[in-house]
Amino acid sequence: MVMSACSPAEDSAIAPIESINSNTDAIDLIIAGDYIVTMDENDNVIRHGAVAVDGGLIIDIGPASEINSRYNANGHLPGNNRIVMPGLINGHSHAAMTLLRGVADDLALMDWLNNYIFPAEVEFVDPEFVRIGTELACWEMIRGGTTTFVDMYYYPDIVAQVVESCGLRAFVSATVIGQRSPDAEGATDSIEKGLAFIDNWKDRNSRITPIFGPHANYTLNEEQLKATRAAANDAGVPISIHMSESPFELEYSKQTFGMTSIEMFESIGFLDGPTIGAHVVWPTEEEIRILAERRIGVIHNPTSNMKIASGISPVTDMLQAGVLVGLGTDGAASNNDLDMWEEMRLAAFLQKVDKMDPEVMSASTVLNMATSGGADAIGIRDKVGALIVGMRADVIQVSFDDVHFVPTYDVISHLVYVADEQDVASVTVDGKLLMRDGEFLTIDTERVRREATALASRIQTALAERNQ
Ligand SMILES: [Zn+2]
């Protein structure tokens, strides 16, 4: 639905004018745009609109003329050639792996993991690596308009500290894996450390949700998976896990457990609690039914699935069955960037070519998966993912200045089929500006660039020596 603010009569007739703050004191921020893409339940789009922000919340939304006359604001983001929309939700990432971007490409998942990524991680990943890599990832995600991400990596305390200082919103996993890892001796040790991390961060910062991230059912046995679920439920936090990702996992699961992954998770009670399942490329019909019934948040990672040749996730079938599906980038070592605009485009294209039907997934469906649908998949739809009065002010402006937006017939089509991370103009999380006109306000990008480059050159030297 498109609402127009072109004539006053239309404004008063259809614009949603509600306000939860009617005092005359200056509010924090007014964010204007030629179009306000709300992603609310009616998919309202407001022409020449504005979003009023105060105390971290969206307090009003409507035609710019009305918002400007109603409020004095300390900050203004002008709306000429700007599209205002909810920030993007990256439902699956391994942020610090930005430092392994391009270190090993063009390999199968298990070869890539066992012969390159796991050994490189054991050798190089320490708190310093995680700090620099996560800062690099946050810089890139802010650049691209991502405002919430779900992360799975090591040294979660460091990840959470970086998220706290850069201003993003995140679910930060304490990773649990059966083998020795950079921050633990095995599953029991990582669960214990994870509980301490969760205790440290629960209720500390409303932008940061500490969770458990058991890696997968091919890196953890049944007892370890059960113990992780029990610990997560005791701590009252969700779980994020890789689920039904590759043909290897499918085969491993059948041979080891006598059933496919999601059936196996269900059979041991692992799905008894909030769960975010990354990938879900190979679910059976019965498993799709389980995912819908259990309200598992499935995160589709099209670039990673294509690059590692994991397969094509049956996203259309899952959506039809009522499964909650969001989008993610996976780590930058298997992508190799954190550009959610590319994920949207590829999610649509993959379904179209897979079903040989261009109508099977629309631009608005994938835009929903990257915003309010993604928020639903990770369990925070009441807070973010749409521009609605009372929700947290996680708002981005996309610039339509670049040549590839000329002409503009359909703003939703352009957001999905044209825009990329370089088109994002401003990023606000919890009402606080993180980027304005391409300027980063919470990250010293030159320092991060310097530190990342220096660390990568140490990794490159060590890998060259190891492979001699
Ligand atoms: Zn992953």
Image: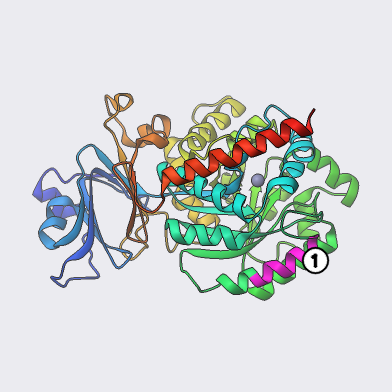
Query: Which residue, given by chain and number where applicable, does mark 1 sit on?
Result: 188
Which of 73 and 357 lies nearest the eye of the viewer? 73
The quadrant of the image that shows the N terminus is top left
Residue at position x 63%, y 31% in the image: 306
Q: Secondary structure at mark 1?
A: helix
Residue 314 visible in this rendered orientation of the protein? no
For the stretch drawn in magenta, what is the main secondary structure? helix
Tell me where residue 199 sits by quadrant. Answer: bottom right
Query: Is residue 192 rendered magenta in the image?
Result: yes
Q: Where does residue 257 sit, x and y in percent of width and height?
A: 88, 52
Q: Nearer the viewer, residue 456 or 21?
A: 456
Residue drawn at 13 percent across, 62 percent down: 72
Q: Please state which of residues 126 and 252 is positioned toward the viewer in this rendering.
A: 126
Amino acid type of the residue that numbered disc 1 sits on in the rendered structure: Thr
- Percent position (x, y) of residue 355? 60, 28
Residue stretch rendered in magenta on the structure: 185-196
Where residue 228 appears, as percent x and y from the top left, is 74, 65
